[in-house]
Amino acid sequence: MPIYPVRMMLSTSSKQSAPLSLQPDIFGHSGHHESTNLVRSKQALTRPWLASPKHITCRRIETNSITSAAWSVLCAQYLTPPEQLVYAQFPVNGPRSQEWLLGRIAAKEALQDLYGYEPLTVEVLATALGQPQFVSSHSILPKVSISHSHGTILVAVADQAVGIDLERLDVRRFGDWFHLAFTATELALIPKENRETALVAFWCAKEAVAKAVGTGLEGKPAQWSLVHASQDGKRVIVNHKNQNFEVQLWYEAREVVALCWC
């Protein structure tokens, strides 16, 4: 069962753009975003991930697109006071704080694409199980899932339960640890060709399903069983508590993305 790399359709070049310097014109004008006819109060920082299905709004951004002086400005422009309290608990300008902040920005911009809600009228807070959720007085609030890997952030927003998981392939390599996450039956579904990439992709599939269910893996990956994989490796079925969940997979030279909706 070969795994073939699939070039994802991105709205911009795969090359990284220059870091955002937050000059006044970045936030000082309104205009139509390319994926919506809603008018924004400021230009979007994130960009659409066009590989996603039409009924799911996905946006992405990289931490290296933001200059060091911009983080405090972004915090004030996008985070409510409760969110700022959470943000303040991270090391200043550390990788975790940057990914956390950009995840909230991407989620809010995806929500703005759908409903036009201004960022400061919505909060992205954690559930009791640590999964992100929109909190607001707005009557319509969809589901949200956030993933980040070594400075790349990808968010999915949908009117149904959704889970997304991204793993960068160009930053670190994966060894025997992933074999601990799969049973012998599951490993039999993973091809020998491009096996390392397939292991990462199928792990992402488990993560995506667990996010869509709303619990996360909770440290028990064996409870999320791979029961089927398509020949091209772009579709897998994960079973959890006798319920099957379909996951779509996308492969690129630098990353793997898994997306589940149910």
Image: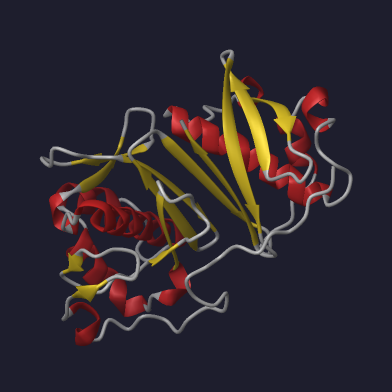
Q: Residue at x 25, y 68 (%)?
A: 74
User: Is residue 86 or residue 160 the one in the foreground?
Assistant: 160
Side of 136 relative to 107 (left or right): left
Q: Is residue 24 above or below residue 220?
A: below
Tell me, yes or no, if residue 88 can be seen here.
no
Side of 150 relative to 252 (left or right): left
Please state the horizontal and vertical placement of residue 214, each as a whole percent of the image: 42, 29
Please state the horizontal and vertical placement of residue 26, each as a whole percent of the image: 25, 81
Side of 163 relative to 179 (left or right): left
Here the colouring is secondary structure
Which quarter of the picture shows residue 126?
A: top left
Q: Residue furthest right?
A: 192
Q: Residue at x 75, y 51 (%)?
A: 197
Q: Residue furthest top?
A: 242
Which quarter of the picture shows residue 24?
A: bottom left
Question: Looking at the figure, which quarter contains the N terminus?
Answer: top right
User: Is residue 122 or residue 8 the one in the foreground?
Assistant: 8
Please state the horizontal and vertical placement of residue 173, each as a whole percent of the image: 74, 56
Q: Is residue 229 above or below residue 110?
A: above
Count all numbered tags in the image, as a single digit: 0
Please state the horizontal and vertical placement of residue 28, each as a whole percent of the image: 16, 81
Tell me, yes or no, if residue 232 can be seen here.
yes
Q: Residue at x 32, y 55 (%)?
A: 110
Q: Residue at x 65, y 64 (%)?
A: 7
Q: Residue furthest left?
A: 137
